[in-house]
Each structure stands twice: as C-alpha cells, then as structure tokens.
Amino acid sequence: MRFPKDFLFGAASASYQVEGAWNEDGKGVSNWDLFSKIPGKTFEATNGDVAVDHYHRYKEDVKLMAEMGLESYRFSVSWARIIPDGDGEINPKGIEFYNNLIDECLHYGIVPFVTLYHWDLPQPLEANGGWTNKRTTDAFVKYANVCFKAFGDRVKHWITFNETVIFCGHGYLLGAHPPGILSDPKKYFQATHNVFTAHARAVSDYKKMKQFGEIGITHVFNPAFSIDNNAENEKATYHANQYSTAWYYDPILLGTYPEYVVKQLAEKGWTPEWTAEELDILKVAAPQNDFIGLNYYQPQRVAKNDVQEDSTPKSREQSTGAPGNASFDGVYKTVKMADKVYTKWGWEISAEGFLEGLRMLKVAYGDVKMYITENGIGDEDPIIQDEIVDIPRIKYIEEHLKAVKKGILEGINLKGYYAWSVIDLLSWLNGYKKQYGFIYVDHTNNLARKKKLSFHWYKQMIATRGEEL
Ligand code: BGP
C-alpha cells in the first residue's frame, strides 16, 4: 500500500532547540535562557544561545527540507520573540521572522505545522509562578490570538502545547526543567489544569475566527504495559495509564478528568483549584479539537513499586527518560527488561508497543484524527569516510512507519508522521551529542550542514509514498 494522498510526511523541531539568536531583534528572555545556565542542569552546560543558528540559516535549512521532499515542517514559535515580556507589547521583528519562515516553507510547497508552546516561557511569566498562575493562562490565550491573526492566513495547522506532562512533570516533580521544583504534586496538577484550560480557550477562540484550519494539542504517548501477568503489576499498569495517559487525553478529547485520578487527588489534597467555569470550558472545547498529536519514543514497562524509600529521580541523569525510576507517587516503577532492545540513552525501541498503544487509543477515544508529531531515535551517529551513516535511524523510522501503515489499514485515523528531528539540534538535557536529525550539523566547522544517509532514505520513502514499507 502507498500512504494515502492526504497523509503528510514531515519532520519537526522546536524554537529553543534550533534557533539560537537568543537575545537578538528584540526577543525577550525565556525561562530556558536562564535555566540552562544554572550549573548542573544541562549536559556539559550546553544551552540554546546559538543552538544550530536556524534563526539566521532558515533559508538554507528549508531548502534542504525541500530537497528531501518534506511535505510538512513542524516548528515552534518562541513566545518571547513575539511578546518579549510574555504579556505586553508585540515585537514586530519576531512576527517578521516567522512570516519569513512560513513564506519560505510555502515557497517550496511545505506545509507549516506550528506549535505555539514548546517549553520556552517568557521569563517574567515564569517569575510570577509560571503555569501554576492563571495569569499565564490568560497571557497564553492572548499570545495565541496574536499568532492566529498574524500567521493564520497561511498557517492551517496549529498545535497549542507540546508535551504538557514533560514541562509540568520535569518542572514541578523532578526539578529537571524550569522552574526546577522538586516533588510538588499540588503545583504539578495545578499547572496541568491551567495548561488544559489555556488550550481549550485557544481552541475556542481559533474556531471563532473562522480561519478554517486545524487545531489540536500534542501529548507524550507512552502507553504502559505490565511486565507480566501478575495481578499487582497489572493494577500498577492501570494506575500508570490513568496518570500518564488518561489525565492528559481525557480533558482534551472528552472534556472531563478521569474519575480514578480525580478521586485519589481529592484524598491526597492534590486537586487543582478549578472553577465550574473552567471545567465547562474544557467540555465546550473538547469536540472542537480537530486532532491529537502524539509524540512516541517508547512504551513504559511497568511493575508495582515495592521499595519503600523515596526513589523518585533527583538528578539530570535520572530525568532523561530511561526506565528504572519509581513514579512520583511511589505506586509503580518503570523497568528495563532483558528481552527488549534499547538505544544508547536507554530508551526502549518498540514499534510493537507503538501499534498496540495506538489500538488502545482507538478504543478509548474512537476515531479522533491523529498525527504522529514526533518519533525518532537519539544516537551518536557514526561518520565513515566523511559520510554520516545513521543506519539505526533508518531502521527505527522504517519500523515505526510500518506500524503507522498497519494502523491505517486497521482503521486508525492517522494523517501524518513527523520525524524528530529534521536537523541535529539541542537536546534539552543531553546537549548536542544526542543526535536525531536527517541533517548533520558540524559544530567544529561553523555549523555547516550535511545530509546524512537517512536524508536520502527519507527522501526516497516520501517519493514512493512508503510503498515498499
Ligand atoms: C520530546 C521533546 C523534544 C525532544 C525529544 C527528544 O520530549 O518534545 O523537544 O527533545 O523529546 O528528547 P531528548 O532530546 O531528551 O532525547
């Protein structure tokens, strides 16, 4: 089978990870501009001050994307470029940059798929409580409206937030992302609720504008599977799926929070401060979502956690996504299994888990349209006689695209696939060493770009619409 005509083959990036130019052309300071400079927070003190200089090299980069045959480019807008203090004046230079980037994409027929929030929050908002403060919600809705007005004539695909579970979980439970707070579940749940209402309000506003594009949110997709059929482990797995999937997907797609979690939060005193009006906003917006975006890297293999002492991750190294940690509430733990395959950074490679998870989503949420908004492998790519021979990347993407194809054949409503990432970029906690791109960036030679083997492979795959997969 060839992938359907309306299926988009793309690749993704995020502003802080590629742009650089952190203090140019009127851009405000973001939480990541500061956080990445706190000693010990990032791998070898890397930061996005320069990143891969996409801000100045976007023309060259988009040209390479066009050469690859990319049908769509998912990128994020830096809020602090558009509204430097987060909630005040608009910076015309910021608008101009994204206008140029969008026009450059369209010039080559590349569909821009725009994420409004990929973790870089204007610092003044962070300093005022970040996502735990409802004023950030109001500011986001304003910012979203500015973007819809400025770019909506040409951008017809919008993602409000990228991976709420990560920026809230790492921000308020693990202390590994800004604002660097450790083990504060009350704040964590409050932040997630504020994000969901910000999303819902932005969706409703977008629909009112009648721009006739699509809008949705992107979530981490890490379905949990029990390590065996022991009843205790299966119970722990149910718990994991409720907290890491249902808590995130239900309020967006069903407009309600999962009862199982709501009940436990009340018992523990972790219920967010939510108003009847906010809960209603979620309900009203749910059917207005056009799609859900899924970022899939690996599943969770789950067992009951029986270690009594606090074993939640505390360091950067423990917060980078490899299994082996207890959940924040101590109920379950993720397990590295002897019969599974892992990347150099300890992430499981499982296209089967991907497909199985997609089936679970279909059962829970029906025929909702889905885009795979991120999927890929972080690796240290081998260079052989000056060529970047990233065969594990080709294999990884091939296997996962096969799973997507099977899913489509089974009737799962999948409409696009975005590899993470289009170009080698800054990994938030792993620096530049962990590569994901089709395009290599030479940090020893003025950030020169070079096509990897996977570039040619993806190009061929797109040209044949995956017929050989
Ligand atoms: C996702 C993020 C991306 C990207 C990716 C890879 O969670 O949305 O921004 O960073 O993960 O993660 P890492 O760089 O930690 O390997």
Image (spheres, helix red, strand yellow):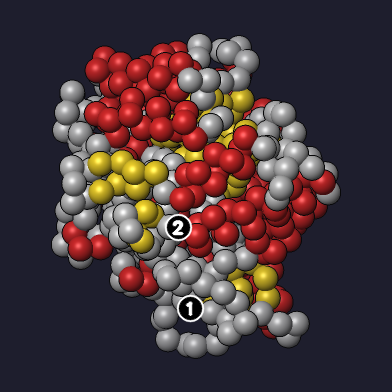
Give the left or right position of residue 269, taking residue 413 as reference. Answer: left
Q: Residue at x 66, y 30 (%)?
A: 290
Q: Which residue is mark 2?
A: 390
Q: CA distance from mark 2 to mark 1?
A: 27 Å
Give the left or right position of residue 198, taking residue 237 as reference. Answer: left
Residue 418 in sight: no
Q: Position of residue 55 (x, y in %)?
A: 27, 30
Q: Residue at x 25, y 41 (%)?
A: 448
Q: Nearer the viewer, residue 462 or 213?
A: 462
Q: Position of residue 96 (x, y in %)?
A: 30, 16
Q: Name the kind of residue labelled 1 in the image.
A: Gly
Q: Position of residue 300 (x, y in %)?
A: 59, 68
Disc number placed over residue 324 in the picture, else none: 1
Q: Residue at x 25, y 49 (%)?
A: 442
Disc number placed over residue 129 in the picture, else none: none
Q: Name the kind of residue labelled 2 in the image.
A: Asp
Q: Residue at x 70, y 54 (%)?
A: 403
Q: Position of residue 327 (x, y in %)?
A: 50, 72
